[in-house]
Every structure is written in C-alpha cells, then in structure tokens.
Amino acid sequence: MNINYNVLIFVHIQKTAGATLRSIIKRQYPKGSVLEIGKSHHHFPLEEFKRLELAERDRIDCLVGHIPYGLHEYLSRPADYITFLRDPVERAVSQFYYICRRPSNRIYPLIQAKNFSLVDYVENDEYGRADNMQIRYIIGAGPEAQMTQNELEQAKVALLDRFVCFGLAERFDDSLVLLRKALGWGRVYYVRQNVTKDRPALTDIPKRVIKRFEEKYALDAELYEFGRREFEKRVSSMGDTLGRELATLRMLNAVYGTLNRAKAILHPTNQSIIEETTGLLGSSR
C-alpha cells in the first residue's frame, strides 16, 4: 500500500451515474484497498467501519458508497472527496423507477403494498428519500435536518472547498476527463451500469407532477445550477486538450465495449486474450 497519497472518498448520491464510476475507481487502486460501504449484503456497514481499529481504517485507500461528507474524521490520513451531481428532478424520477424494478430494495415492499405512483412517491417521505438529497450528502446532513437557504450556501462552499473534483451525470465523459486530470487516474473507459430502464422522459410526465418535484427539490436545483456553471468553467479551461481527451476516451470505450460483449459469448479459456487486451487500453497514464 502506498500511504503517500490521500484517501479518496466518493460520495455516491443515488442515481448520479455512481455505479459506473465505482467500476472505474476500482481499477485505480490495488485490489483490496477499496472499501464499498452500504446496506446490501455485499457492502461493508457504515457503523462497522466507524468501529474499526484506526490501523485497519488506515489500510483503506478509497471509500465509496452512499455515504455523506464527513468520513475523513475517522481517518488519520488526509482525504480527497469527489461526487457527481444530477438534475434533481431527473435524479428523483430515475430513482423511483429504479426502485420499482428492484425487489431487493428496502423501499420496494412499501411501494408495492400501497401501490404508490410517482405522485405518491414525491408526496411521501416515509420512504426515507428526503427532500434536497444532494445538499444533504454534500454537507453531511441527516434526513431529519431542515434544508434552508443556509444549508444551500454551505453546500456551495463545500463543493468548491472540500471536494477536489466533482462531475455531472449528464456530462459523464467530460467529468471523467476532469477526474483523470485531478487525480492522476489511468484507465477510465467503462460500460454503463445500473441504468434505469423503461422510465418515462420528463416530457411524458404530467406537468403538475414535475412542478411538485421542482418544489420539493428547489434547493437542490439551485445547487445543481451552481455546480453546472462551475463545471463549465473547469471544462472551458482545458481548451483543446478536452477534445483530444474525449476522442481518446470514446475510442477506448468502443474497444472496451466490444471486448465486454465478447466475454459474454466466448469460452472462459479464451478470456485471457481479452483481459490482456483490456490491460493494454490503460497501460499509459
């Protein structure tokens, strides 16, 4: 383990392309040094992480999960935070339809038992899906905390001062280029994961429902717009380099996608060829 670099903490806000980013993050660090924190059976529980001996926590090079800002307080090494933002209405709608197709999700039984619609979802907080969730994650506030203009301003400051880099789900490739530059990453090609399928576009949802979402996530919308403007500045500052980086990334993605499709149909004994080729895609940093 190289303890000369900072611990990376990825604050994964639900439905912001985080599952895809996690797969990329795992390629940047030694095997066994990335700890995924969460509530599912294959993730490490947050409270258990907090109870680990400090020496055990310091063996971790990267923390990822639906975790709020603040876990650096449980580490002796310095930490860098990253996160992704998304249009809050798009994010919430995507989350609802994602849950509806995931029987393993803890909210799924509630939705099914009461036959809740998208309208019911936005009107009820019993799901544990509090308003202005992106601000809550960025400043480390719990679901019971009241979100006001003050918390929004805190989130704006935190996004600029406490996060070494952030991306936008809608500008995923551009975001990867910024992350690669900020963190010195190597292989950032990917195949999209956890994409919500068969969900309606916002234009197909009644305007009164959209308006209710906009009201509930109004502060998140302000944060997102603030983040979008800052993101545009950072992208613009790269000049022609951005175009070249994007062209390379998309070329590698095309190859990587083909290789992954081949994995599904080739005999396991032939997969070593694919793995060697995949390794070559990220051989230079």
Image (cartoon, rainbow, N blue to C red):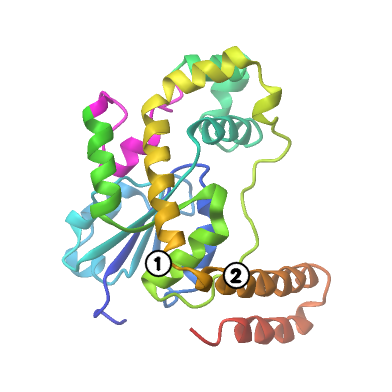
Q: Quadrant of residue 221?
A: top left
Label 2 crowd (10 A; few <14 / some 14-19 / many >=20): many
Q: Position of residue 191 (x, y in %)?
A: 65, 62
Q: Of the residues shown, which amino acid type is indicated by label 1?
A: Val
Relative placement, left or right, of 214 versus 51 is right
Q: Nearer the viewer, mark 2 or mark 1?
A: 2
The residue under the point 56% across, 73% down is 245
Label 1 crowd (10 A; few <14 / some 14-19 / many >=20): many
**Could you say which is closer to the camera, residue 135 or residue 104?**
135
Q: Quadrant of residue 132?
A: top left
The residue under the point 50% across, 52% down is 18
Q: Position of residue 106 (x, y in %)?
A: 51, 33
Tell me, yes or no, if residue 246 can be seen here: yes
Tell me, yes or no, if residue 33 can be seen here: no
The stretch of residues the image draws in magenta is 126-149
Q: Secondary structure at mark 2?
A: loop
Residue 52 vs 202, above or below: the answer is below
Residue 53: give its label.
none
Residue on which the image places disc 2: 189
**Could you say which is closer to the camera, residue 284 or residue 53?**
284
Residue 172 vs 91, above or below: the answer is below
Magenta portion: prevailing SS class: loop
Q: Of the residues shown, which amino acid type is indicated by label 2?
A: Tyr
The residue under the point 72% across, 81% down is 274
Relative placement, left or right, of 54 versus 171 is left
Q: Position of residue 80 (x, y in %)?
A: 28, 63
Residue 171 vs 222, above or below: the answer is below
Residue on which the image places disc 1: 34
Picture quarter with the N terminus: bottom left
